[in-house]
Image (cartoon, coloured by chain):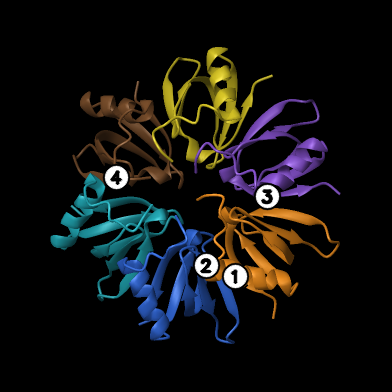
Chain colours: A blue, B cyan, C brown, D orange, E yellow, F purple
Amino acid sequence: MSTELDVKLPSFRQLQTLIQEESEVEIKLITNDLLVGKVRWQDNFCICLLDHYDQPTIVWKQAIVFLKPKP
Amino acid sequence: MSTELDVKLPSFRQLQTLIQEESEVEIKLITNDLLVGKVRWQDNFCICLLDHYDQPTIVWKQAIVFLKPKP
Amino acid sequence: MSTELDVKLPSFRQLQTLIQEESEVEIKLITNDLLVGKVRWQDNFCICLLDHYDQPTIVWKQAIVFLKPKP
Amino acid sequence: MSTELDVKLPSFRQLQTLIQEESEVEIKLITNDLLVGKVRWQDNFCICLLDHYDQPTIVWKQAIVFLKPKP
Amino acid sequence: MSTELDVKLPSFRQLQTLIQEESEVEIKLITNDLLVGKVRWQDNFCICLLDHYDQPTIVWKQAIVFLKPKP
Amino acid sequence: MSTELDVKLPSFRQLQTLIQEESEVEIKLITNDLLVGKVRWQDNFCICLLDHYDQPTIVWKQAIVFLKPKP
């Protein structure tokens, strides 16, 4: 994995859409934690999630099991 | 791993078949969760799964243990 | 890891032998699940296992802890 | 992954900011441990965290689930 | 990681020595299993372990936590 | 990851210092095990740890969560 962004991949673009639409998402982590918030930015390694108080959490993609837009 | 899709690999093609046939699958995850649904798309990093209400879940391939077409 | 198969590696060839001889194997997974069946095919990312009813399971190699031919 | 630093990535730069500002952070690990301290340095593989007694802990990035600046 | 063996690395050579000397080793796995046996061969991805009945187990290196020669 | 050592990285050099100074370290593993000893050598994949009886343990870096020099 390198520093060039994987911008052409569906998963990368799907996340970009969620960022632009400021959608709320649920992220399930390998520790079984469930984070809820809005995705602020992503790169190849991380996602930045804002919680309800706009506090940022930098989540490593390696630790993500699944991500669900809240319906 | 790069942005080019691994389209020639059996595992990749097998998943493409499941997408085209809209088959229902079970996905076992490293958190021991078991997801059920239809695969909508895949890329090198993720699989998008639609549940019975057509809600999408983006599943990271790194977190998949096994996938079983429902018989 | 790329799309070219690692065909020269002992582990890859050993698995090919098990496929050709239709040997029964036990696969221990990181979730502690133990799968039993015959290996149908492999590529760099996955192994396809057939259970006693010939139902296929696509197992991600990343989730395999060990594999044992049944004696 | 290579020895060149991923200095252009947002996640890398965000961490650099936290290092320069000597901000206190919480780091959640895949073992469910929660470490608290100040980030001293990072490279592609590790983060060095200083606890309240200025004792260093070298944390492998592969084991990080998320990192949160303390509000 | 590619098909060329990492033959120059200390960890690789150390394992080669254990293979040649038919030393008994303990292998701790990420599932917390502890396997005991003699290493028969290794490649970049796997180690083959022979138990007391000379039954082979193919262990994925990705699942190894540590390996200890029995004293 | 390749066979060339990542000798320029801070994390690699920090470990080299610990090796040269024969410092005692604590290593937390993803299985939650805590190993104590002196680091004898490292390469890109492994660390060799000597316990109080000078018995070596080859620890895979992939399984390390954090490492702490004993104060």
Same-subunit check for callouts 3 and 1: no
- Element at badge 2? loop
Chain ID of residue with mark 4:
C
Q: Is residue E2 above or below residue A57?
A: above
Contact between marks 3 and 1 (CB within 8 A): the answer is no
Residue C6 in view in this figure = yes
Q: Is residue D47 above or below residue C4?
A: below
The residue indicated by pointer 4 is C3
The residue indicated by pointer 1 is D13
Where residue F11 is drawn, which disc sits there?
3
The Cα atoms of the two marked residues, 1 and 4, are separated by: 32 Å
Give percent across and percent down for residue C22: 22, 27
- Element at badge 4? loop
Residue at x-position 55% and y-position 38%: F4
Contact between marks 3 and 2 (CB within 8 A): the answer is no
Give percent across and percent down for residue C58: 28, 46
Name the amino acid, label 2.
Leu
Name the amino acid, label 4.
Thr
Residue at x-position 63% and y-position 63%: D28
Residue at x-position 59% and y-position 59%: D64
Q: Is residue C43 above or below residue B16?
A: above
